[in-house]
Image: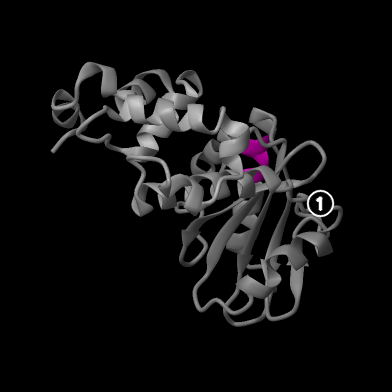
Amino acid sequence: MTINVMMKNIPKQDRPRERLIKAGPTNISNQELLAILLGTGTKEESVSELSQRVLMHFEGLNLLRDSTIEELVAIKGIGPVKAVVILAAIELGKRMHQLKPQEKYVIRSPEDGADYVMEEMRILKQEHFVVLFLNTKNQVIHRQTIFIGSLNASIVHPREVFREAVKRSAASIICAHNHPSGDPSPSQEDIHVTKRLAECGKMIGIELLDHLVIGDHKFVSLKEKGYL
């Protein structure tokens, strides 16, 4: 059953879900948000009326935030299921509020870049071509595996690499791929791909800082080798 069909069976005054879809969650009232959590009202009152009564009982969100399951089920129309949903939503909100922004990893050298990917990439049985997207402070803002398979210029297309860079508003990128043999010595194809990506990066203003070839607990920086 589609959302539109479901909404037709709900009285207009009891359509907070529809309002959230159309207006967005920041543009609906506390009462409507609570009504969405409650889902249904009772035989005597609509879900909107029930949600309004719950908010009046707790004099708004401040006291509701610290409510207990005993306090909630004591309200007519609120059973254990509705009470649990409310408490779960409150707890989730508290945990989100307590989240601290994670510090972004900063890459200052080829060693920093290799350390960031080494433990995961050195054990891979196939070649993985990974791109690290950096901001102006050389902090990693995103990491993405572009393709899996033997490195080939026709497969590692700059379009795929830089499309994501533009999407992420990256200032620069670092590429890395592994050699399952454990030997990070770069091949001619590695060098060719590196130069091609570097040229494309210069044209669009997103610098390729390095291309790292990952072996088993060792790596080669194509920048240090003079290919960038």
User: Badge 1: how crowded within 10 Å, few (<14), some, or many (20+)?
Assistant: some
- Colour approach in the figure: one colour
Q: Is residue 115 magenta?
A: no
121 up-or-down from 103: above or below: below
The answer to whether residue 165 is seen in the rendering is no
The answer to whether residue 20 is seen in the rendering is yes
Q: Main secondary structure of the magenta part?
A: helix
Q: Nearer the viewer, residue 55 or 117?
A: 55
How many numbered marks, from 0 up?
Answer: 1
Identify the residue shown where x is 48% and y is 53%: 70
164 up-or-down from 140: above or below: above
Q: Amino acid at mark 1?
A: Val
Identify the residue shown where x is 36% and y is 34%: 36
Q: Position of residue 197 (x, y in %)?
A: 62, 45
Identify the residue shown where x is 59% and y is 41%: 65
Identify the residue position indicated by label 1 in the image.
Answer: 106
Q: Nearer the viewer, residue 37 or 24?
A: 37
Q: Which residues are magenta?
A: 196-201
Quadrant containing the N terminus in the rendered view: top left
